[in-house]
Structure formats: C-alpha cells, structure tokens
Amino acid sequence: MSYADKVFKENLKSILEEGTSTKNQKVRPHWEDGTPAYTIKQFGISNVYDLRKEFPAITVRKTALKSCMDEILWIYQKKSNNINDLNSHIWDEWADKDGSIGKAYGYQVGKAYIHHVSDKLPSSYDYPSVLIQATIDRKYKIWFDQMDAVLYDLKNTPFSRRIMISLWNPEELNEMRLQPCCWSVIFNVTDEGRDKYVLNMVLNQRSNDFITANNWNTAQYAILLMMVAQSVNMIPGKLVHSITDCHVYDRHINIAKELINRPEHPAPKVSLNPEIHNFYDFKTSDLIVEDYETEPQIKNIPIAI
C-alpha cells in the first residue's frame, strides 16, 4: 500500500462516518440537471507527506500525473488564466467564450509588485518578471511577480518565513469566474545536516471535492515542490496539505465506498529530469513516472459546478 492510499482511505472513512451533511441547506454547487449538489463534509483535514520517502500518488485508481503537472505549469510557470494555454479540459465549465477564467489563478501569480528597494543598481536579475524602477532619491525599486519572488527569496534569504504565494486577492474576487480552491502555498527551508537544504511546503485549500480532486491536488503540488526545489538546488521535503472544507458529494458516495474497499499497490517512483535547473524550462515530458500500478479508473464521474 502506498502511504497516499492509507491517508486517502482514512480521510474518506472519516468524512463518511463522522462528517456533517449540507442537505437542505442553501448551496452554490449544482449538478448538470440543476439539482443542488449536497455534500458530507469534514472541517479541518491536514495531511503530511514526505517526498523523501515516497511520492504521494494513490493506487486505488490512477491519478493522471502529467495532466496534474500541466495544470501547475499553466498556473505557476505560464501564469495564464486562459484555458487555451491548458492541454486538458478541466476548466472548460468556468471559462468565458474567449477561454478566460477572469482574474484568477495564473493571473494572480503573474501580478508584479515592489519586492524590495536597493541602494545600488543591480547588475542583473535572471527572472522573467523583473522590473527595475529608479526613484528620485537614487534608489531602485525591484518589481517581481509572486513566482519569481519565491525563486529569488529561496536563493537569497532561504530561512525567511515570508516565502509564499497567495491567489486570494479580495479586490478582484468578483472578477474571477471561480475563486481559487487551492489558494496559497508557503515555503519553508530546513537545514537537516545534509549537503543541501530541505525545501518544505504548505498547501492551503479552502475547499476540496475529495473524489474528483483530492489526490489530483496533492500530487500536483508535490510536483510543484519538486520543481521549485530542483530550481534552487534543494531537496524536496515535506508537503503539508491543509484543507478547510473536505467533502464528498451526494452522487459520489457509492464511488467513495468502492474506493475504500479496493486493493492497494506500492507507490510509484516519480522524479524530474535532472538536467533541468531553471523553473521556466520544465515541461510535462520532464516528469518521469515509473512502476505506477493502479486499480481501474472510474469513468464518467458526475461533476458539480
């Protein structure tokens, strides 16, 4: 059994046996036929995965790891909010006629801000978003977007406790076609006496549709942690996945029970092309997945929108 399978099944059992129902409450999500999509939910689930031990992919059904990575590249590398830059169709329901999801996800990652002020004109900054602005008092404002700020800080002030990305911008929530579920990541570096520092990450998620998205989100942010760590010459360490509202939809309950009773397999071996050291050079083809044995995929799972 993979550790991810163990956690996945424990979480599912907890939701089904101890969770509370939203039935007959006023809820936003609905099914394609217009019926309200009610849930059984648990508040405050937090899971910890150590990437030095194994990659957190479930085996009770297959998680499409390269598609997971493609969405991460779309948000954090391409900094896009247009589904035409994405190879899957998971965002089609929320896009407008031009493919935009509004000022959400990649749009927020790509917004530049004044990161720091320097007394000297920097010789160079090797970051795509950098903008250097001279001031009247002979100082220089250095602008980065959120992703470049993380990469810069991890290289220059790795033990800062302020290295994070937030997709939750209250001023622009009403201009997002879907407000972010995975809304922030926080990076934290530890010195554990190895030849390299260890990079850890917390993923904060306000809402998690457990059957369709739980392991998808866990796996894709594990890949993000691996990409960032390799880009700053660190070892990927622990991923803490913190979920506020973890739920199973009413039309997914039988699927949940089936998954709990399925057999498990060992975790796959997942790594990145060791030749890539620039965050912006990674492609889905650089994800190496070996020995990923799973139970059959469950097809045609209804999606609440």
Image (cartoon, rainbow, N blue to C red):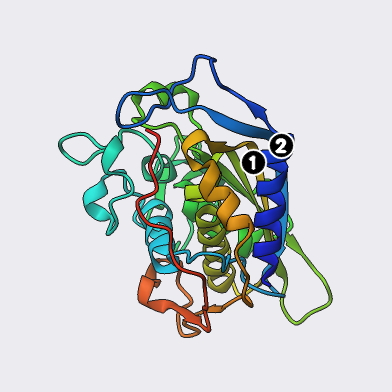
Note whether 226 is above or below 201 in the view shown: below
Report the residue at 56% width, 69% height from top.
59
Amino acid on which disc 1 is placed: Ile
Q: Residue at x 27, y 59 (%)?
A: 87
Q: Is residue 233 left or right of residue 158?
A: left
On the rendered structure, is 164 left or right of 74?
right
| Residue appearing at x 49%, y 38% in the figure | 167
Q: Within the image, what quadrant is residue 260 found in?
A: bottom right
Q: CA distance from mark 1 to mark 2?
A: 6 Å
Q: Which mark is residue 87?
A: none
Quadrant into which the N terminus falls: bottom right
Q: Does residue 238 sit above or below 181 in this rendering?
A: below
Label 1 secondary element: strand
Which quarter of the rendered picture does the C terminus lie within?
top left
Q: Which of the pair 300/208 is nearer the observer?
A: 300
Q: Quadrant of residue 191?
A: bottom right
Q: Residue at x 72, y 71 (%)?
A: 197
Q: Position of residue 154 (x, y in %)?
A: 62, 61
Q: Nearer the viewer, residue 98 or 4?
A: 4
Give how far across and how far down residue 34 sits, in percent: 32, 24
Q: Is residue 43 left or right of residue 146?
A: right
Is residue 116 at all visible to an observer of this figure? no
The answer to which image quadrant residue 40 occupies is: top right
Please state which of residues 30 and 224 is positioned toward the viewer in this rendering.
30
Pointer 1 or 2: first along the chain: 2
Label 2 is placed on what type of residue?
Gly
From the top left corner, tell me how far across and down residue 296 is, in percent.
Answer: 45, 68
Q: Which residue is mark 2?
A: 44
Question: Pointers 1 and 2 in contact (CB under 8 A)?
Answer: yes
- Label 1, on which residue? 243
Q: Is residue 304 visible?
A: yes
Q: Is residue 19 left or right of residue 136?
A: right
